[in-house]
Image (cartoon, rainbow, N blue to C red):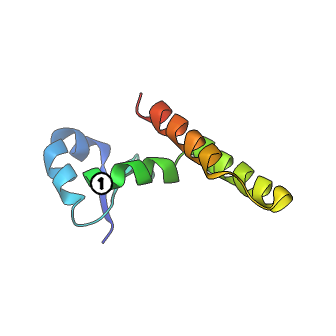
């Protein structure tokens, strides 16, 4: 269930709006236009969420896939190293 909240309501009721994300995404509007989506995330889902929304990681994944197509594979070590570097960058 998608919910909508304007910036003023978010400012006045931050804790309540965050709790509402347990029931579904909350779209924050500014002057009636959608601006931000608040999405609840569990501790064990945070890394997956950050990677899935990281343009740099997705580009790295695409390069690895292209290398796989050209060479018939990419080394697991290379992919793991790229993933670890990207996770470190995201956590800063």
Q: Identify which residue is drawn at 14% across, 45% down.
A: 15
**Nearer to the camera, 85 or 2:** 85
Q: Is residue 57 left or right of residue 14?
A: right
Q: Answer above or below: position of 69 versus 55.
A: below
Q: Identify which residue is drawn at 71% across, 51% down.
A: 64
**How far across and how far down the image is residue 3, in percent?**
30, 63
Task: Locate residue 10: give its quadrant.
Answer: top left
Q: Identify which residue is drawn at 53% across, 35% down.
A: 85
Residue 20 in sight here: yes
**Circle 1 crowding by C-alpha within 10 Å: few under 14, some 14–19, many from 20:** few
Q: Answer above or below: position of 91 versus 8.
A: above
**How far across and how far down the image is residue 34, in percent?**
44, 53
Q: Does dot 1 land on a helix, a strand or a loop?
A: helix
Q: Which residue is mark 1?
A: 44
**Which residue occupies the extreme bottom position in the image?**
1
Task: Locate residue 57: give its quadrant.
Answer: top right
Q: Which quarter of the rendered picture does the C terminus lie within?
A: top left
Q: Identify which residue is drawn at 30% across, 72% down.
A: 1
Q: Is residue 53 left or right of residue 1?
A: right
Q: Answer above or below: position of 9 versus 26.
A: above
**How far across and how far down the image is residue 17, in percent?**
20, 51
Residue 41 in sight here: no
């Amino acid at each position: 269930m998608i919910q909508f909240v304007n910036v003023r309501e978010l400012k006045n009721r931050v804790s309540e709006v965050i709790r509402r994300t347990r029931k579904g995404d909350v779209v924050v509007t500014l002057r009636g236009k959608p601006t931000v989506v608040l999405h609840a995330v569990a501790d064990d889902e945070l890394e997956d969420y950050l990677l899935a929304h990281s343009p740099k990681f997705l580009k790295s994944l695409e390069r690895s896939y292209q290398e796989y197509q050209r060479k018939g594979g990419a080394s697991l070590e290379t992919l793991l190293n790229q993933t670890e570097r990207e996770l470190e960058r995201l956590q800063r």
